[in-house]
Image (spheres, helix red, strand yellow):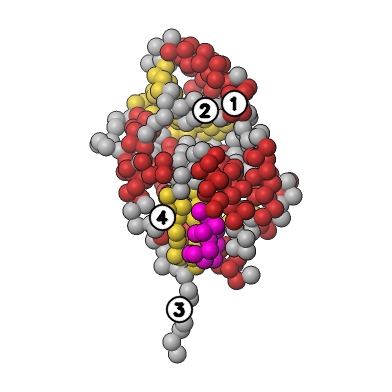
């Protein structure tokens, strides 16, 4: 008897972010496209595709470019997505940008109709000064009510959704995929020599990430280790909520103070994909003195590249960092953060072993094929319902 081959699940994958969430979407789409049981069509914002490494990743992924920067483009996107749904007839719509692109969530909710809609929510609760606009709040409400299933990156994220009235059976926890292999492949030169006492703070410069703690931390560490260097690399966040809060002016004062100290190296700009790995390969330690967080793409770059992560116990960071085994965890107060930094700097060989353990763990547990496999299991359940 010949077994009938199961039809491939048709997935319309949408990610209309051109930032870090866009990279996540590109790697996820590529993992789906490598599977025989999935037929995927991805919708991306054209800005994301200006990156040569992203274009390489998406070379074999069927895709549609959909401009999504201006209000007019976003309104046209509603109509365009409606046409794609009608013509391509997917079994599943999966938005991997989640509430990070709030208007996109509204558009998808408007056009998805009877097609099951799945969302990957990276930050179920907005960070300080973010996500307070009416359309952002409406998008989150639509996600909670309309999504057939929601993926989050840790148990705390799931608890947040359940506390907002989402049925726990509709929420699955998956690891954030590792990003180190992507950025190391994007590097245009040979591996960079790691600098033993160089500490990296990387990513968008927002108040929730503890930017205001960096100077007092560095001042005290410098007195213990005069050869230390702090690298700050990332662009200032210009979201509307933060502009209204006066954060931009405070941040400029902080950056000016950093530049006045010889132990700071400041790159307050967008860091192209081709440069990212260079910073993590230089730094022996990646510091996340976050005041609040859900998860962190920075961790998923640092760990696979072997830069030791020191992070505060906030959000789901303890879900991916085992204190003393794959990184260091600390409380959010200055004394605790400085204590863990001093410990790591005083025992570089032990820290190096922890970095190696973290690299192996991230590449094993957070690889994209494993994540795609977990997601496809949910697709199958929803398609059979």
Quarter holding the C terminus is bottom right
Q: Residue at x 29, y 32 (%)?
A: 192
Q: Of callouts 1 and 4, which one flags the residue occurring earlier in the amino acid sequence?
A: 4
Instruction: Bin the neighbour count of mark 3 within 10 Å (Cα to Cα): few under 14, some 14-19, many 20 and up.
Output: few
- Provide residue 128's location: percent of width, then percent of height: 63, 29
Quarter holding the N terminus is bottom left
- Mark 2 vs 4: CB contact within 8 A: no
For the stretch drawn in magenta, the main secondary structure is helix
Q: Which residues are magenta?
A: 80-93
Instruction: Bin the neighbour count of mark 2 within 10 Å (Cα to Cα): few under 14, some 14-19, many 20 and up.
Output: some
- Mark 2 vs 3: CB contact within 8 A: no
Answer above or below: position of 301 versus 111. Answer: above
Q: Taking 102 as reference, is 161 left or right?
A: right
Dot 4 corresponds to which residue? Answer: 63
Instruction: Bin the neighbour count of mark 1 within 10 Å (Cα to Cα): few under 14, some 14-19, many 20 and up.
Output: some
In terms of image quadrants, where is residue 189? Answer: top left
Q: Residue at x 59, y 42 (%)?
A: 102
Q: Taking 323 as reference, is 184 left or right?
A: left
Q: Residue at x 41, y 15 (%)?
A: 263
In terms of image quadrants, where is residue 200? Answer: top left
Dot 2 corresponds to which residue? Answer: 237
């Amino acid at each position: 008897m010949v077994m009938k081959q199961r039809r491939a699940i048709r997935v319309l994958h949408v990610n209309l972010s051109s930032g870090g969430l866009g990279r996540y979407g590109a790697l996820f789409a590529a993992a789906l496209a490598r599977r025989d049981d999935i037929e995927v069509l991805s919708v991306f914002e054209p800005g994301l595709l200006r990156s040569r490494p992203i274009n390489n990743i998406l070379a074999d992924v069927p895709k549609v470019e959909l401009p999504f920067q201006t209000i007019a483009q976003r309104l046209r996107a509603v109509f365009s997505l409606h046409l794609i749904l009608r013509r391509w007839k997917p079994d599943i719509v999966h938005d991997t940008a989640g509430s990070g692109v709030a208007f996109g969530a509204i558009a998808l909710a408007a056009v998805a109709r009877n097609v099951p809609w799945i969302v990957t929510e990276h930050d179920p609760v907005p960070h300080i000064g973010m996500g307070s606009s009416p359309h952002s709040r409406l998008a989150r409400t639509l996600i909670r009510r309309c999504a057939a299933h929601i993926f989050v990156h840790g148990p705390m994220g799931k608890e947040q959704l359940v506390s907002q009235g989402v049925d726990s059976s509709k929420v699955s926890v998956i690891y954030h995929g590792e990003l180190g292999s992507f950025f190391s492949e994007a590097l245009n030169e040979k591996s960079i020599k790691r600098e033993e006492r160089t500490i990296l703070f990387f990513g968008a410069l927002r108040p929730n990430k503890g930017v205001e703690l960096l100077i007092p931390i560095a001042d005290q560490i410098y007195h213990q280790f005069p050869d230390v260097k702090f690298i700050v690399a990332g662009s200032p966040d210009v979201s509307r909520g933060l502009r209204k809060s006066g954060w931009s002016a405070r941040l400029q004062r902080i950056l000016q103070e950093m530049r006045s100290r010889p132990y700071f190296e400041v790159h307050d700009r967008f860091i192209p994909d081709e440069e990212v790995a260079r910073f993590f390969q230089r730094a022996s330690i990646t510091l996340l003195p976050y005041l609040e967080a859900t998860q962190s793409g920075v961790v998923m770059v640092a760990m696979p590249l072997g830069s030791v992560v020191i992070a505060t116990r906030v959000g789901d960071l303890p879900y991916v960092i085992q204190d003393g085994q794959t990184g260091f965890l600390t409380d959010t107060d200055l004394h605790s953060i400085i204590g863990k930094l001093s410990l790591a700097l005083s025992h570089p060989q032990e820290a190096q072993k922890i970095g190696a353990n973290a690299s192996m763990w991230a590449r094993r547990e957070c690889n994209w094929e494993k994540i795609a496999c977990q997601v496809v299991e949910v697709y199958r359940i929803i398609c059979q319902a």
